[in-house]
Image (cartoon, rainbow, N blue to C red):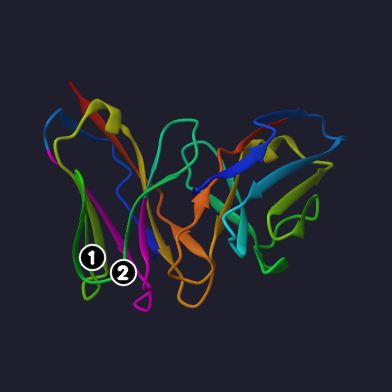
């Protein structure tokens, strides 16, 4: 079992729809969870971080964390073609500086 | 300011060359990282420096040699690379600790001929 798992996609949604990206992790001791967006040929850019169970909202983005189910998700409301990118879920290994990445989900938003 | 800078943006080198990648941050971060990323794959951790000391080496071949001259700078020295080492090399920094966000630089696109 991989430490951090994501569906590779592509996930295709129409403009204006809600895109839902999911991630599961195996280490129950994990405490910090991050979503990065990466455009083709560019470096990862932080979208959201979340540390506590529940929802965290920032503009059109909402991160959801359920530690009991070892599940973290990212919702993008009113999706735009400019949101088309690969979204990387990352989890910090407990008590280390090490970030474990999922394989990423490619999101395509079509007009 | 969450800027991490990297130079050069692109690098082409032969298998017998020696080159260096540079990374700089002025955010007062105490942890700095080197990652390697191949196409359509996630970033793969290579090295972590914490307080200017090497704290993690992910069994990286010795043809990659990291150096942290001071708290703001991180270098990656390259020697006798193979074509399969061609990739995007990413530097990141953070305040350190498992709850802190890592901020990535723009990367160096390396091609080994």
Tell me the chain of label 2. Answer: A
Q: Are marks 2 and 1 on the same chain?
A: yes
**Quarter of the rendering containing residue A78:** top left
The spot of residue A12 in percent (x, y) is: 21, 32
- Between tags 2 and 1, which lies in front? 2
Of mark 2 and mark 1, the one earlier in the sequence is: 2
Residue A65 numbered mark, or none: 1
Could you tell whether A61 is left or right of B15 in the image? left
Determine the residue positioned at 38% across, 73% down: A30
Callout 1: SS = strand
The spot of residue B104 in percent (x, y) is: 52, 47
Determine the residue positioned at 25% across, 73% down: A67
B95 inside magenta stretch: no
Determine the residue positioned at 29% across, 28% down: A82
Nearer to the camera, A67 or A8: A67
The spot of residue A24 in percent (x, y) is: 29, 62
| Residue contact between numbered discs 2 and 1, judged by CB atoms under 8 Å | yes
Looking at this view, name the residue that lies furthest to the left: A17
Mark 2: give few (<14), some (14-19) or many (20+) Cα within 10 Å. Answer: some
A60 in relation to A39, above or below = below
Specify whether residue A2 is in view.
no
Could you tell whether A10 is left or right of B90 in the image? left
Mark 1: give few (<14), some (14-19) or many (20+) Cα within 10 Å. Answer: many
Could you tell whether B85 is left or right of A67 in the image? right
Residues in magenta, as a range:
A18-35
Quadrant holding the C terminus of chain B: top right
- Whole-angstrom CA distance, mark 2 to mark 1, is 8 Å
- The residue that mark 2 highlights is A51
The spot of residue A11 in percent (x, y) is: 24, 37
Tell me the chain of label 1. Answer: A
Nearer to the camera, A59 or B61: A59
Specify whether residue B3 is in view.
yes
């Amino acid at each position: 079992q991989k430490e951090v798992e994501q569906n590779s996609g592509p996930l295709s949604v129409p403009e204006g729809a809600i895109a839902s990206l999911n991630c599961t992790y195996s280490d129950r001791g994990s405490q910090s969870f991050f979503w990065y967006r990466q455009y083709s040929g560019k470096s990862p850019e932080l979208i959201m971080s979340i540390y506590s169970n529940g929802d965290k909202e920032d503009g059109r983005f909402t991160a959801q964390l359920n530690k009991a189910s070892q599940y973290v998700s990212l919702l993008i409301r009113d999706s735009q073609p400019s949101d088309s990118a690969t979204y990387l879920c990352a989890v910090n290994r407990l008590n280390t500086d090490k970030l474990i990445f999922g394989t990423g989900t490619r999101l395509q938003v079509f007009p | 300011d969450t800027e991490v800078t990297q130079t050069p943006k692109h690098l082409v080198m032969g298998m017998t060359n020696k080159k260096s990648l540079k990374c700089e941050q002025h955010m007062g971060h105490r942890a700095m990282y080197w990652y390697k990323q191949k196409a359509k794959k996630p970033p793969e951790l290579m090295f972590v420096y914490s307080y200017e000391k090497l704290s993690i080496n992910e069994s990286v071949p010795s043809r990659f040699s990291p150096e942290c001259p001071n708290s703001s700078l991180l270098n990656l020295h390259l020697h006798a690379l193979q074509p399969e080492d061609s990739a995007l090399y990413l530097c990141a920094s953070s305040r350190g600790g498992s709850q802190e966000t890592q901020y990535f630089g723009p990367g160096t696109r390396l091609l080994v001929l």
